[in-house]
Amino acid sequence: MTRAPRQHHLLLACIIIMALICALYSSPVRAQSEVSVNTLDTSAVASQNKPSVITLPLNKVHVVSFDRSVRDVIIANPEIADVIVKTQTKAYIIGRSTGDTDILFVDQTGAVMNHIIARVDLDISAAAAAIRELVPSAEVELRSVNDSIVITGVVHTAKESADANTIAQQFVAEDSNVVNMLRVLGDQQVLLQVRIAEIQRNVLKKLGLSSNITFSTNKGPGSLAFDITTFGQDLASAFEAVGQFSTGAPNIPQTTYSALERQGLVKTLAEPVLTAISGESASFLVGGLIPTVGGVDSTGNTIIEFREFGVKLEFTPVVMAKDHISLRIATEVSRISTENSLTIPIQQGATSITITGLSVRKTESTVNLPSGGSLMIAGLLQNDEFTTIDGVPWLQNIPILGALFRSPSFQNNQSELVILVEAVLVRPTDNKQQLALPTDGFVSPSDFDLLILGRLFKQYGSVKNSDEVPIIGGPIGYFMP
């Protein structure tokens, strides 16, 4: 009986000792497992805080609130954004310059409680408001890309596009930071009808005399014909050629008087019709090309270039508003002029070449016209007078009789150039509408009409009198909408 209780107590003591040993060895493991659990929880919390993107206008403030205290703030690029923490649960983000940067907020335990990507852009709200107010008809959308503003949308005229671009340039550092991608709607093709008219009047008056003297020498008979204007030169050359004169009296001189009066009249008319897109240039030339010397190559050969002459027109239309056109016109009228020619010796003066000169008149102007309006450029007048007197020295100064030893010449060139311009917006016609052609209604003549009646085309009906021709009721000529 006594042994059994003793064995029982001994077994119980062993169990208690074993339990204490197990508890002693198991407590560090339990503490270590608890630490591991806390670490996993922290990483899990950090992984759940995905970066949030905020768009912040330049020099503006964004407020961020937290549910627990903030210990540290980490900014990847402080030049782009700055953070001010006023309280432990509230921070203020300030945009300093355009760009993107990461901002990390760390709590008291060292865990990242919030990850923000701050995107600082230009303040386009003010620019968009200004464009909506000043250009109300434009459908414009603004976007900020780094330091630039991109304008997209549609406008009705090129002037609205230019105005929107100018307004946006006031909100950027440089004008090149505005990217204009606006699309212009409406009619952007301009038809230009030009009439270039010029009248030239030339007057030439000339009065002179020439003589023919026959004489004899000891070397045979001879003759001398000279112009009174070059009497001294001709006589000296005759003495040198003939030699000594005899004392015999020469024949009676034969004198020829010449009087010339010439008048000329020239009319020049060109009527070009040009079409150009708004903002693009179109040109027109009626004339030709003349060769000119452009230089000398490495082998010594002359380089020939061609220069335009005649009536040249260049215009650049810009559709500013509805039925309103800004037109820049450059007109040039040139002709070959021998007075402006230049002779250049080549090969050490052995030979020479003559470069043909041009007489040029040109004008350039910019005007605003309504669609269908006309512009006349006048006042391009030119009046050239040339007066020369050739005569024999001393003899031409004799009163009354000196007129016999003078040869006066008078030339007057007058010209006037007028340019008439009409600008019209071009609109497409209906595809179903059949346009008239010059060959419509033309029928070749029959043998009877051609051989007997002398007609070049088939004629239907007869017209008694041109005064009785009925007036055409519809539009004729070019269709100008």
Image (cartoon, rainbow, N blue to C red):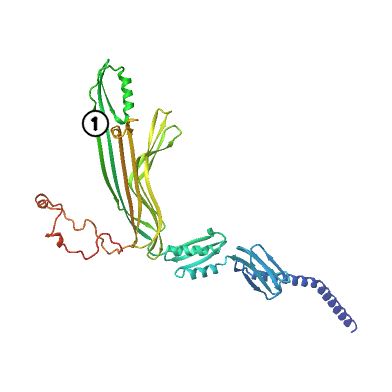
Q: Which residue is mark 1?
A: 256
Residue 469, horizontal then vertical, whole percent: 16, 62
Quarter of the image for residue 377 reads: bottom left
Q: Is residue 205 above or below residue 46?
A: above
Q: Residue furthest front?
A: 399
Residue 470, horizontal then vertical, whole percent: 17, 64
Q: Is residue 432 above or below residue 265?
A: below
Q: Nearer the viewer, residue 390 or 450?
A: 390
Residue 84, horizontal then vertical, whole percent: 69, 69
Q: Is residue 464 left or right of residue 149?
A: left
Tell me which residue sits at (67%, 68%) in the image.
83
Q: Residue furthest bottom?
A: 1
Dot 1 falls on a residue whose secondary structure is strand
Q: Residues within 10 Å of mark 1 (few under 14, many from 20)?
A: few
Residue 256, horizontal then vertical, whole percent: 24, 31
Q: Is residue 151 above or below residue 5?
A: above
Q: Is residue 445 left or right of residue 287?
A: left
Q: Residue furthest right?
A: 2
Locate the N terminus and report the quarter of the image it occupies: bottom right
Q: Is residue 195 above or below residue 38?
A: above
Amino acid carrying mark 1 in the image:
Thr
Q: Is residue 225 left or right of residue 2?
A: left
Q: Nearer the viewer, residue 409 or 161?
A: 409
Quarter of the image for residue 471 reads: bottom left
